Image (cartoon, grey):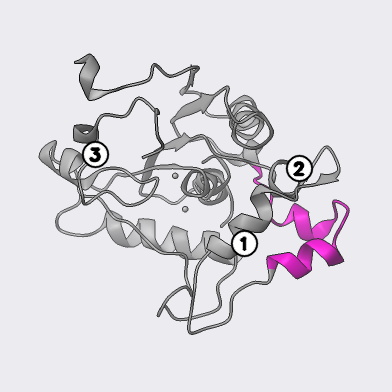
Amino acid sequence: MFPHSGVKPEHTSDYTAFEAPDPLYWTKHGYAVIVADVPGLWYGDGKATYVSPEEAELFYDLIEWAGVQDWSSGLVGLSGVSYLALMQCTPSSSGMLISGRVAELHPPHLGAINPDEGYTDFYREVCFHGGIPDTSFFPRMIQRWGSSTQEIEDLETEVRIHPFFDAFWESKSAQLEKVTCPAYVIASWQDQGLHTRGTLEGWKKIQSKEKWLECHGRKVPYSQESD
């Protein structure tokens, strides 16, 4: 938890993965929770690619697998923050790009998406803000995006090779107009270049007949002494 974020210790359990739903809370309400790694990371098979059409197709397969298990109702929902939201929207898994990437493929068992503070344009919102290279968050993110015994996509080199928006970056952008499933989208005002722009643009462009947007602003500092 980030300091002074307003999140109380009891709001999440020790089973909660980073930026993912809390399994302890949701299983108590009758849901099953699946946390999937990016294919190819750690000891996973294949080559790790990020926000890619290949990743979206594998995410599609995961949704369809979950939808036919004997413990499943046949409806799969997606929820998560940032990259997990991105994959809900892109052809590649919580943000808007991932939710959109797989939602645009229309898996039959996908019931709804809940992207929370994601991004929809990998070029403009992550690598180049207003055409200016990001020299802070993006380089740190590259170092954090996984280890593997397999090959991992070299984002640092790709940024040097593709300084302008081209077909390569187009392949990493969500085709939001193809998203039609119900969507409950959550945005904030605190991360304008990355999550704010990406989430609001995503909500505006998706074609879902049932879509909701919640924006949250400042957080009230929490301390145990104030209880």
Residue 212 seen anywhere in this rendered image of the structure = yes
Camera-near label (2 vs 1) is: 1
Q: Does residue 162 show up magenta in the picture? A: yes
Residue in view at x 51 percent, y 80 percent: 46
What type is the residue that disc 1 sits on? Answer: Ile
Q: Does residue 2 show up magenta in the picture? A: no
Asked which secondary structure carries label 2, the reply is helix
Q: CA distance from mark 3 to mark 2?
A: 32 Å
Mark 2, residue position? 124
Highlighted range, magenta: 155-175
Judge from the rendering whether residue 49 lies leftward or rightward of residue 79; answer left or right. right
Q: Residues within 10 Å of mark 1 (few under 14, many from 20)?
A: few
Asked which secondary structure carries label 1, the reply is helix
What type is the residue that disc 3 sits on? Answer: Thr
Asked which secondary structure carries label 3, the reply is loop
Sequence-wise, which precedes: disc 3 or disc 2?
Answer: 3
Camera-near label (3 vs 2) is: 3
Q: CA distance from mark 2 to mark 1?
A: 16 Å
What type is the residue that disc 2 sits on? Answer: Arg
| Quadrant location of the C terminus in the rendered image | top left
Mark 3, residue position? 12
Of 177 and 224, nearer the camera is 224
Judge from the rendering whether residue 188 lies leftward or rightward of residue 79; answer left or right. right
Q: Residues within 10 Å of mark 3 (few under 14, many from 20)?
A: some
Residue 175 is labelled as: none
Sequence-wise, which precedes: disc 1 or disc 3?
Answer: 3
Q: CA distance from mark 1 to mark 3?
A: 27 Å
Check contact, mark 1 vs mark 3: CB within 8 A: no
Is 29 above or below relative to 103? above
Mark 1, residue position? 142
Residue in view at x 26 percent, y 29 percent: 8
